């Protein structure tokens, strides 16, 4: 991570903190810019939060732009609250969905929460992060208070939101609980009375139209809303999603992560540089300008960004090794077969055993890789984890791991 910063000048902070922020309209963008500058001029540590509904165990780069922004606030000396939506996750965020999301059980939320917190501290400074759970104040709410909260909004207010409007036009049903999600999220902001809330651009309605409205109606100063674009996947077009298959997982090995980043289209470079690296905005601007002027090739710029992403997740040494491997294997055309390590066959020559033994993977991980078509034997996709191997076989696991099979001497 970057070195810890103290309270820099307001303008120095603004350059970093507003970089990558997209609030959907110039008017709202300017309003939030002005409000943030006013808060920073108070010359005190701001309390900044982002809420995370734990709905998965396998996190990917698409989950971390808001964490990177939180870390930027930390590095300027501000207080960060990492809010686990332990109650709202059970309700389900309808944003951007074409159907009602199934409600999660308490055990699922608890399991997913542990993953989110562990992954969050890859980016955030644990010593300067306050972790809270919104079931602590949402679960005890009396029904009368919930009704009072709901009475502050009209149905028309919610139907203006594209998520609901599109579904109404298609004739799809909408559950009352889906309206309640935004209201409960707004209550989080009201309860914590924080200065700034960070989220994705898909949360503008929830944060601005519902959250700030509730705060103002209850006599509270509305917090500044800072929203970030949704990170595209490896196809450079669609939102990063496991269901689409375009993700870069936080658990990917450094070589695999670097390779996936290098496969991104050039037009995704700006977004990745600003949302999932520690590069200063000026450095990103100069990098893009150098590409435009022809001072640097797009592939060299992409290597710089890929190294920065891998460094953020895995560390500088791993990023350097991944960059070196990419240059040797793909740019300098080193033959992966000639360079691959040897595996001496034992009595058990099944694919699953060889990979478990040589690459320190579990049987379940090997099964998953085979199911994904990520293992090739002599350039043919493996379909059976128990396939027998023979001397002279060549294995490719993922894009960057290779193995030559040799007879035991």
Image (cartoon, rainbow, N blue to C red):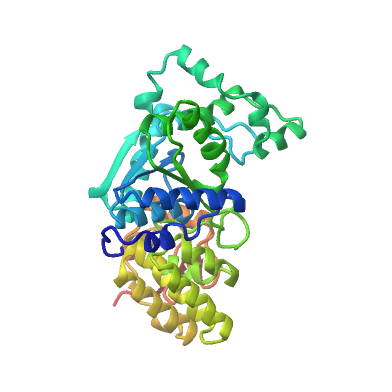
| Rendered location of residue 313, percent (x, y) | 36, 61
- From the viewer's side, name the closer residue of 4 and 44: 44
Q: Is residue 346 visible?
A: yes
| Rendered location of residue 243, percent (x, y) | 57, 48
| Rendered location of residue 94, percent (x, y) | 58, 35
Q: What's the residue at 54%, 37% (across, down)?
A: 206
Q: Can residue 401 be seen in this view?
A: no
* Image label count: 0
Establish if 148 lies above or below 62: above
User: Going by the picture, which residue comes out furthest to the top?
Assistant: 144
Q: What's the residue at 29%, 72% (across, down)?
A: 317
- From the viewer's side, name the closer residue of 300 and 149: 149
| Rendered location of residue 292, percent (x, y) | 58, 81
Tell me: 190 left or right of 344.
right
Tell me: 157 left or right of 404.
right
Establish if 298 lies above or below 238: below
Tell me: 93 left or right of 135.
right
Establish if 364 lies above or below 328: above
């Amino acid at each position: 991570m970057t070195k810890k910063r103290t309270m820099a000048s307001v303008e120095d902070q603004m350059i970093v903190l507003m970089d990558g922020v997209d609030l959907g309209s110039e008017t709202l963008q300017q309003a939030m810019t002005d409000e943030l500058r006013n808060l920073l001029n108070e010359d005190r540590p701001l309390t900044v939060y982002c809420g995370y509904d734990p709905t998965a165990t396998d996190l990917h780069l698409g989950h971390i732009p808001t964490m990177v922004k939180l870390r930027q606030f930390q590095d300027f000396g501000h207080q960060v609250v990492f809010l686990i939506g332990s109650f709202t996750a059970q309700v389900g965020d309808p944003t951007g969905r074409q159907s009602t999301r199934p409600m999660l059980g308490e055990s699922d939320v608890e399991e997913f929460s542990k993953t989110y917190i562990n992954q969050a501290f890859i980016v955030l400074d644990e010593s300067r992060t306050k972790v809270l759970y919104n079931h602590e104040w949402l679960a005890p709410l009396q029904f009368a208070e919930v009704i009072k909260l709901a009475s502050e909004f009209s149905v028309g207010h919610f139907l203006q939101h594209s998520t609901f409007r599109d579904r109404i036009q298609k004739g799809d049903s909408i559950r009352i609980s889906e309206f309640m999600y935004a209201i409960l999220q707004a209550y989080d902001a009201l309860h914590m009375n924080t200065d700034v809330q960070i989220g994705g651009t898909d949360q503008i309605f929830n944060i601005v139209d519902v959250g700030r409205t509730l705060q103002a109606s209850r006599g509270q100063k509305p917090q500044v809303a800072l929203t970030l674009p949704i990170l595209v996947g490896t196809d450079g077009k669609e939102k990063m999603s496991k269901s689409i298959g375009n993700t870069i997982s936080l658990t990917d090995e450094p070589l695999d992560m670097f390779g996936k980043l290098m496969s991104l289209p050039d037009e995704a470079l700006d977004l990745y540089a600003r949302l999932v690296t520690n590069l200063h905005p000026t450095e990103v601007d100069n990098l893009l300008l150098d590409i435009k002027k022809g001072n640097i090739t797009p592939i060299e710029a992409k290597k710089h960004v890929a190294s920065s992403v891998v460094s953020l997740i895995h560390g500088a040494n791993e990023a350097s090794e991944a960059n070196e491997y990419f240059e040797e294997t793909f740019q300098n055309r080193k033959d992966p077969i000639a360079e691959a390590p040897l595996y001496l066959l034992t009595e058990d020559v099944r694919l699953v055993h060889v990979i478990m033994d040589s690459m320190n993977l579990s049987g379940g991980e090997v099964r998953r890789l085979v199911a994904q078509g990520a293992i090739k034997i002599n350039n043919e996709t493996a379909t059976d984890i128990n396939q027998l191997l023979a001397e002279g076989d060549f294995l490719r696991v993922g894009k960057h791991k290779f193995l030559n099979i040799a007879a035991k001497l």
